Image (tube, grey):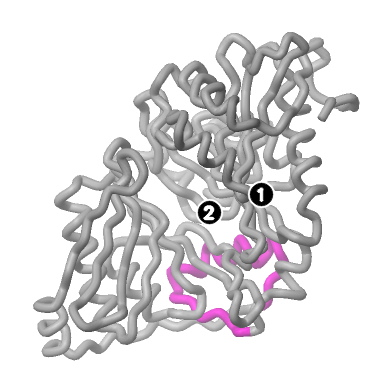
Amino acid sequence: MYLDFDLNFGSQIEKKIPILQIAKPEEAKEIPDVFDDAYNGTYPYQEFTNVQEVREMINDPNFHWILFKLDNEEIVGCYGFHINLEGKYGTFHGFALKRKYQKHIDTLKIIIGCMYAIYSAYKDKIFVWSCEVRTAHSITQYMGSMCGLAPIAFFPNKDIFFNRIESTILTITYDEKALYKYHSKNKPKLIPKASYCYLYSKLKYNLEDVKYENPIIKLDSEKVQRLKKKFKKEIKPYKLSYEKITFSFNDSKSYFEFLFNPRVLNCERTQYKVSYLEELYVFIQKLKSFIKKKKVRYYEAFISAYEPHHQKFFQDAGFLPRGYVPSWRFNKEKQFFEDFVVFNYFKGEVNNVQIIPQSESLLNTLNFTIDMEPKIIKIK
């Protein structure tokens, strides 16, 4: 794709305009080289810096890498995306430019060109796109907002870039079908603590009112003790330095699993299934022990917006709601999207934050601007 269009805003300084091309398997080495150069060898997610992993992504029809090439065929940057056609969902990841070109390449035109091509290619196939953006600087937030990606959830102190702890914002864009035609007709049930992040999403996407519940948790203590005796924990290597942690019980199909990244001490991609509340209670208690033992800095889980008891369990365990994400997951059996609440836990002070006004609105709703030091830099 040649970026042969003009933008009537932004810097008037002439910058280099690369050509966009889908990466080929033989170009797999180029992508780790870009990340190593851009992040000075400190990029925390090894799947993007490992040639074999990148080659597998390129060969996977659900993953694509876009390379930024100059006229002399030099590769100066990259951007990736992953699609799930059955789930009608896609994610963007891994935008990077080599350091010596970061002030000499028209990054805004690159992003707009990439997004236009991708949105056009998957129109009527992918209804939800998301991307996690750094808060150490505002440029990626600004570029994403120009392409329709809006802040929806806050991940405080999730990552480590350049050996410094950073926060991340989940941004998202929807096809109207995801929010209306294929949106679940079930009415969400939320704990009161989730009202702040729900109000933010409600106003942004014109959502209907929800029902609030503050359930009283009553557990069978004998059942809890029996479950503790049947508890099993399994730790398996999962791609490079990641570990897949699975909790379960003997003679039960219930489970609770997530990925642990020892390099940055964070946990994500939580999935679970339980038959009754006592099982989830035991799982969460064991999770708290794991977090303490492994000195986990950050943990995140997306919890169903229709399960107030589950939300209450996570809240009582010290995890707080920091985003309400409508139409986050597509229920293939019922053929509609369901809403989820982001719960997370983090250690330390939230520092080194620069945000655009849209992100500021989200953080204000979550009461994060008051105690932040240094203060958030507002981008006018």
What percent of the width, then of the height, locates residue 79?
Answer: 63, 33
**From this viewpoint, is residue 373 visible?**
no
Rendered residue at 27%/66% (across/down): 317
**From this viewpoint, is residue 250 visible?**
yes
Residue position marked by numbered label 1 in the rendering: 150
Would you place residue 198 above or below residue 100 in this image? below
Magenta-drawn stretch contains 197:
yes
What percent of the width, then of the height, locates residue 355?
Answer: 57, 36
Rendered residue at 39%/73% (across/down): 311
Q: Is residue 107 left or right of residue 285?
A: right
Circle number at residue 153: 2
Question: In which quadrant is the N terminus drawn?
Answer: top right
Magenta-drawn stretch contains 55:
no
Q: Which residues are magenta?
A: 186-208
Would you place residue 370 above or below residue 232 in this image? above
Q: Alpha-carbon distance for marks 1 and 2? A: 10 Å
What percent of the width, then of the height, locates residue 358?
Answer: 65, 45
